[in-house]
Image (cartoon, grey):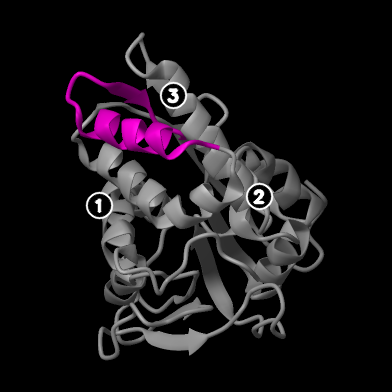
Amino acid sequence: MTYGFDPAWAGERDRMALAELLLDAVTIRQLESIGVRDGMRCLEVGAGAGSMARWLAARVGPEGCALATDIDTRFLDVGAGYEIRHHDIVSDPPLRAEFDLAHARLVLQHVPDKDRAVANLVATLVPGGWLLVEELDFTTSGAVGPLGVRSFARVERAMHQVLAEGGFDPAFGRQLPARFRAAGLVDVEGRGGLSVVRGGSPYAGWYRQSIAALRPRLAASGLIREAEVDRACELLDDPGFELVTPVLISTRGRRPEPGAAPA
């Protein structure tokens, strides 16, 4: 599996922390509606800096289990109540089918073989177990109004082209429900939400950090001039700039019980 952002970049821990700040509340609402409770066995794939692994560990308690996996575990905290394992959801042997819940966020849209990733996640579930995957859909994201619309759009498009070299799909979020059903899951449901934010906000800061992380690759690509990258970063610090965020699409599905009728 490849991932578009280098964990060794000096600001990657801060970029992940901003993503947690922006997205954890949405994820927690999804997990609560699924019914995560004491004693459940839960898998967090692409656990990043570990915020959701910590939440799951606290929720399932000592009778349950929370396993956090990633292709780079440097930001995960030993002793935080969850297990840690280096694991690639695409290329490593699938984990055993022992989990009541598997969750991944902002992971699969970076994976070249997305169908295999979904199949391997489904394979970790016990019958009746739930899969929750959350991915961003950038189809309608972008600047609002006249300030910086064209320059920001060019930078965002260049970022997506650079990331696409590793398999990134900016419209992957909306594809999840169909892929879940194709993988045999039932009770499939996809929900999404977006915000309109100003420059200087935490969401704008996350965008700015993402641009900074990709800046060397953007410069080497020849897709965008450095002056345009500088302008996008200035806009993201400007309270007069407004941005429609990408849609975070949360998709859930359940592994059917043996002998259950097809959905």
Q: Position of residue 93 (x, y in %)?
A: 72, 85
Q: Residues within 10 Å of mark 2 (few under 14, many from 20)?
A: some
Mark in the foreground, 3 or 1: 3
Q: How much space separates mark 3 and mark 1, taking CA atoms?
A: 27 Å
The label shown at residue 113 is none
Residue denoted by label 3:
151
Q: Secondary structure at mark 3?
A: helix
Residue denoted by label 2:
164
Residue furthest top in the image = 146
Q: Secondary structure at mark 2?
A: helix
What span is in magenta?
224-246
| Residue 134 at least partly seen | no
Q: Position of residue 116 (x, y in %)?
A: 76, 65
Q: Residues within 10 Å of mark 1 (few under 14, many from 20)?
A: some
Mark in the foreground, 3 or 2: 3
| Type of amino acid under label 3 | Ser
**Rendered residue at 57%/83% (across/down):** 87
| Type of amino acid under label 1 | Leu
Q: Position of residue 137 (x, y in %)?
A: 55, 37
**Rendered residue at 33%/53% (across/down):** 19
Instruction: Identify which residue, 43 or 151, lies in the foreground.
Output: 151
Of pointers 3 and 1, the one earlier in the residue sequence: 1
Which quarter of the picture shows residue 11?
A: bottom left
* Image-based side of 112 in relation to 13, left or right: right
Residue denoted by label 1:
21
**Rendered residue at 40%/74% (across/down):** 8
* Image-based side of 209 in relation to 160, left or right: left
Of pointers 3 and 2, the one earlier in the residue sequence: 3
Instruction: Identify which residue, 127 or 170, lies in the foreground.
Output: 170
Q: Residues within 10 Å of mark 3 (few under 14, many from 20)?
A: some
Of pointers 1 and 2, the one earlier in the residue sequence: 1
